[in-house]
Amino acid sequence: METPAGTMTETAAGTLSRTAPATTAETAEDGLARAFDAAVAADERIEPRDWMPEAYRATLVRQMAQHAHSEIIGMQPEANWITRAPSLRRKAILIAKVQDEAGHGLYLYSAAETLGTGRDELLDKLHTGRQKYSSIFNYPTLTWADVGAIGWLVDGAAITNQVPLCRCSYGPYARAMVRICKEESFHQRQGYELLLALSGGTPAQHAMAQDAVDRWWWPSLMMFGPPDDASAHSAQSMAWKIKRHSNDELRQRFVDICVPQAEALGLTLPDPDLRWNEERGRHDFGAIDWTEFQQVLKGNGPCNEQRITQRRRAHEEGAWVREAAAAYAAKREEVTAS
Ligand SMILES: [Fe+2]
Ligand SMILES: [Fe+2]
């Protein structure tokens, strides 16, 4: 593969790395940095063995880790309803969805491993509060309708955020996102279908669906992160093409998608300021309560403590599986070597 600024060469390790024609004044690192910038500018993918700035690597590890943590912590609020799903069909769908989320976590931890950060290290950071997961999962699932609202709104917001990540400049992350997004579309669809059934059911079922949407609407808007002018990492991530659109742009896109869907569901979005703006060709919507967001982020949400305690317990209880897998792998290696 050619890079616009230079060529690919064989290194001592036998792998390909980017190089760029160097002028006499510049260091080898300057040349590599120039090749990296050129590859990003040309919309090429950066691969694990390519040279990359340390800050790019650190940003990716932080983002992928937070994303992976969100996938596995996100299993908890919905798993809460598996034993109480109202039919065999609903139970089968919900189990499949929760398993998908575990799979998403695995793809993403694997993608982070390509940057030299092991899964153990990332999980340890999650368990000790040094890395975060999406604050949306610190809200409780109070009724069966919450499973529908999560699918429609939370998975829906996740898709809006994640489809552009399929074009992220880092190859392993972009490729993981392709499959994740396909599965997220199914999740969004099942949530919508569940709410449609409830909304068209008895008055009590309709009220349950409306109540769930009332509680999940604002937290799902917060999933896009702080407004652009208050977002610490946005500008650099966009320059590196890790991120393709700003938080506010994605949030607006999500609102515009949801309004006609809510109408089709026969449900109301809980925002008196929500209206079509003819001039902008988009919907205006009310102010988000960022104080609530900051509080949940700080650990003061309704379920922060419960989620992390449960995660630590699951990790401890799974120790024997990890040990067995490692022993099995060592044994196979022995057999192959002999
Ligand atoms: Fe997921
Ligand atoms: Fe999902």
Image (cartoon, rainbow, N blue to C red):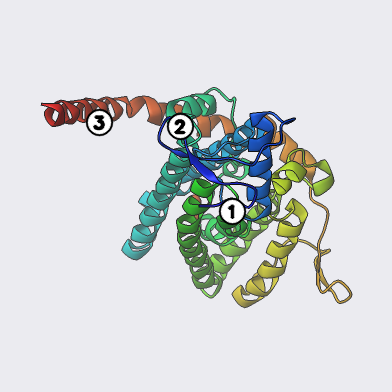
Q: Is residue 279 visible?
A: yes
Q: Nearer the viewer, mark 3 or mark 2?
A: 3
The Cα–Cα distance between marks 2 and 1, rounded to whole angstroms, is 37 Å
Q: Which mark is residue 311?
A: 2
- Label 1 is placed on what type of residue? Glu
29 vs 148, left or right, is: right
Whichever of callouts 1 and 3 sits on the residue coming sooner in the sequence is 1
- Local SS, label 2: helix
Q: Nearer the viewer, mark 1 or mark 3?
A: 1
Report the residue at 80% width, 48% height from top. 228
Whichever of callouts 3 and 2 sits on the residue coming sooner in the sequence is 2
The Cα–Cα distance between marks 1 and 3, rounded to whole angstroms, is 37 Å
Marks 1 and 3: CB-CB under 8 Å?
Answer: no
Of 66 and 239, nearer the camera is: 239
Percent from the top left, x then y, of residue 38? 67, 48
Q: Within 10 Å of the Cα at label 2, are there few (<14), some (14-19), or many (20+) other Cα atoms? A: some
Q: Measured along the vertical axis of the image, is residue 126 above or below residue 17?
A: above
- Local SS, label 3: helix
Q: Where does label 1 land, which residue?
A: 44
209 vs 318, left or right, is: right
Q: Within 10 Å of the Cα at label 1, are there few (<14), some (14-19), or many (20+) other Cα atoms? A: some
- Label 3 is placed on what type of residue? Ala
Percent from the top left, x then y, of residue 300? 67, 31
Q: Measured along the vertical axis of the image, is residue 255 above or below residue 100?
A: below
Q: Is residue 242 visible?
A: no
- Label 2 is placed on what type of residue? Arg
Q: Where does label 3 land, which residue?
A: 325
On the rendered image, what quadrant is the C terminus found in? top left
